[in-house]
Amino acid sequence: MREYNTENGKLVCVTCNRCGKQLEVENGILMEGCFHSDWMFGYFSKRDREKHAFDLCEECYDKMIGEFQIPPEIITVTELL
């Protein structure tokens, strides 16, 4: 869950939706690993037109993917644009 300053739009706080851990934010910049999801469900879904957004700390992300029957595809990126 993300909180922004209403006056300048700067990121103020990021809290893991699963465990409640408050992640470190410094001068509007998230200073630790975080998985952010922002997804709009579409046609043929029971959640049609619902938009879900959440943040997970790295520990909770690791727990989540540890429960997958098929692990996610992981690609190491060597160039950051």
Image (cartoon, rainbow, N blue to C red):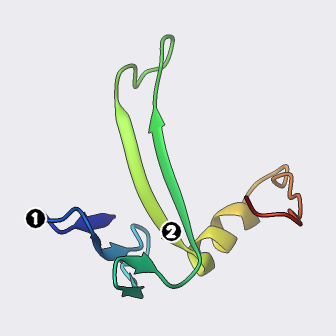
The 10 Å Cα crowd at callout 2, few under 14, some 14 to 19, many 20 or more, is many
Residue 38 horizontal/vertical position (percent): 46, 45
Give the vertical position of 81 relative to 47 (above or below).
Answer: below
Left or right side of 70 for 58: left
**Quarter occupied by residue 17:** bottom left
**Quarter occupied by residue 59:** bottom right
What's the residue at 35%, 77% (across, down)?
Answer: 28
Judging depth in this view, the residue of 2 and 66 nearest the camera is: 2
- To which residue does mark 2 refer? 56
Please, what secondary structure does the residue beneath circle 1 have? loop
For badge 1, the amino acid type reads Glu
Query: On residue 7, which mark appears?
Result: 1
Which residue is farthest left? 7
For badge 2, the amino acid type reads Leu
Q: Total marks drawn?
A: 2
The N terminus lies in which quarter of the figure?
bottom left
Among numbered discs 1 and 2, the one appearing first in the sequence: 1
Q: Nearer the viewer, mark 1 or mark 2?
A: 1
Circles 1 and 2, Cβ within 8 Å, touching? The answer is no
Residue 3 horizontal/vertical position (percent): 25, 67
Judging depth in this view, the residue of 43 and 77 nearest the camera is: 77
The 10 Å Cα crowd at callout 1, few under 14, some 14 to 19, many 20 or more, is few
Residue 76 horizontal/vertical position (percent): 89, 64
Which residue is farthest top? 44
Residue 15 horizontal/vertical position (percent): 36, 75
What's the residue at 69%, 72% (across, down)?
Answer: 62
The C terminus lies in which quarter of the figure?
bottom right
Please, what secondary structure does the residue beneath circle 2 have? strand
Left or right side of 28 for 80: right
Judging depth in this view, the residue of 52 and 68 nearest the camera is: 52
What's the residue at 39%, 42% (across, down)?
Answer: 52
Left or right side of 66 for 17: left
